[in-house]
Amino acid sequence: MWVEILVGSSAAIISGAAGYLLSKKIEKDRLKIYEEKAKAKAKAIEHEAEKVLQNAHLQLQKSELALKRDFERKLEELKRDYDQRFDELMEKEMSLKQMFKDELKHITLEKQELKAEKERIQKLEEEYKRLKEEYTQKYNEVLEALQQQAGLTMEEARELVLQKVEEESRADIANIVRKYEEEAKREAKRRANYIIAQATTRYAGEFAAERLINTVSIPSDDIKGRIIGKEGRNIKTLEMLLGVDIIIDDTPNAIILSSFNLYRRAIATKVIELLVEDGRIQPARIEEIYEKVKEEFDQQLLEEGENIVIDLGIGSVHPEILKLIGRLKFRASYGQNALGHSLEVAHLAGIMAAEMGGDEVLAKRAGLLHDIGKALTHEYSGSHVDLGAEICKRYKEPDAVINAIYAHHGHEEPRSIEAAAVCAADTLSAARPGARREVLEAFLKRVQAIEEIALSKPGVKKAYAINAGREVRVIVNADLVTDNEAVLLAKEIAKDIEAGVQYPGEIKVNVIREKRAVELAR
């Protein structure tokens, strides 16, 4: 029995061991299969990763190439822009150097001319002194000879010589008297014409008011008191800065600005409109708005000049001349707008020059600039012809343009088809029916002459003729003119106006001396 039990146990053990070994073998084979699958999958993943890496590398190369091309393109653009700016700077530098060289040459020539003129005057003075001494010597010799030969005393010889000189000069005296009689007749005739003109001018008040005033609308009459200000401070500041006469009367919701200068009147109108809109009306704010409006007007003048030049197609023009072209809009000649007249002349001259085989563009340019000096006549003394020629010479305008400026008033003969066309076009534009009004121009010239007399005095900063020319307001530099000198200056200006200007009634000369101290609190 024990044997059976042992045999059974041994068989069970052997079968268990065989089963264990078989299961181990099966498990090992399964693990091997999993390992091979994992290796295959790893190879597939590795292959896929290599493909992704290759694609990423290709994409990176493409991006690098695109970035390189974009960099090279931008580098080329920057290089072109740099070269262009460098060329422009070099051109401006050369232009400035040439301008400086021309100015230096001009100053040198003026110095040489001044030195030559000084030497000539010195020689004339020496010659005059020599001739005077020689005359005195000859005169004494004649007296001595008469005294010795005729037995006359010194006094008798002198009387004899003077008598002889008087007899020889009698014919010359008669000619001088006849000359002055003729001049007196011409002066009497001119004076009679002047009186008639003054009488007829009195009836041109309505037309002058229409052309010499602007009306500013205000929302309510309360604004008038604020414009006047406490003790009149605001209106005094406005009139001093703007150079216009501000009339505040019973006219409802309106303020009247009066001045013969269209440019000053336009600036004044804009300044007061902005002050009324802003509501803060006091001296500091008035000065701030005035400076702002003046800068805006200067920019508008430049833009208007540029637009006109572009419309005419006459090429590039210096910015300073462009500003003056824009200022012609605020200038009138015999009641005719100077800019409108210049544009008429430019178009007419271009057509005539083209018909005669000349340069149409050059004729238009000369026609536009022939009266450019009129934009400067309110600030500088001298005729508009000389001022215009000087400004065009300064900014290197063609010789035909300068010749046209001189020729259109007969200072020179036209030397080209273009200049002759400008002269003819100027006459046509001025002579057409309704183009000009003589009475208003005479009034404007008289008021302008009053301002020029005041501005010619030393120490004067600004001068404004207001109140239709019946008052001139003169603002002087307080550092150069004392209170006592201001009184004398007023008398001098009044005396010069009496001597140099023909006017009805009387003109009030008001000299203003203001000392202002400004300091900043930080």
Image: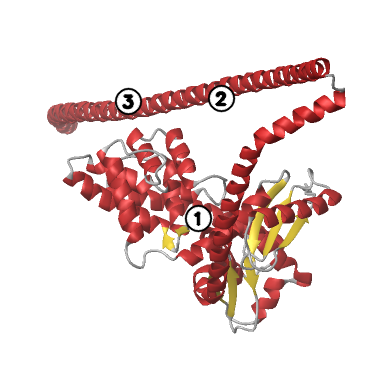
Residue 455 is marked as none
Q: Residues within 10 Å of mark 1 (few under 14, many from 20)?
A: some
Mark-to-mark CA distance, 2 and 3: 45 Å
Residue 80 % position (x, y): 30, 27
Secondary structure beneath label 1: helix
How many marks do you count on the picture? Answer: 3
Q: Which residue is mark 3?
A: 79
Mark-to-mark CA distance, 3 and 1: 38 Å
**Looking at the image, which is closer to me, 503 or 463?**
503
Q: Which residue is mark 1?
A: 297
Pair 2/1: label in front: 2
Image-based side of 264 in relation to 230, left or right: left
Q: Which amino acid, by three-letter code, is at mark 2?
A: Glu
Residue 518 % position (x, y): 77, 49
Q: Which residue is mark 2?
A: 110
Q: Which amino acid, by three-letter code, is at mark 3?
A: Lys
The answer to whether the residues at label 3 and label 1 have Cβ atoms under 8 Å apart is no
Tell me the quarter of the image containing the N terminus.
top left
Secondary structure beneath label 2: helix
Q: Is residue 392 above or below residue 268?
A: above
Secondary structure beneath label 3: helix
The answer to whether the residues at label 2 and label 1 have Cβ atoms under 8 Å apart is no
Image-based side of 410 in relation to 228, left or right: left
Mark-to-mark CA distance, 2 and 1: 35 Å
Pair 3/1: label in front: 1
Q: Which amino acid, by three-letter code, is at mark 1?
A: Phe
Q: Earlier in the sequence, mark 3 or mark 1?
A: 3
Query: For the point 57% across and 45% down, which residue is it?
Result: 381
Image-based side of 259 in relation to 339, left or right: right
Query: For the point 73% across and 60% down, which residue is it?
Result: 509
Looking at this view, name the residue that lies furthest to the front: 150
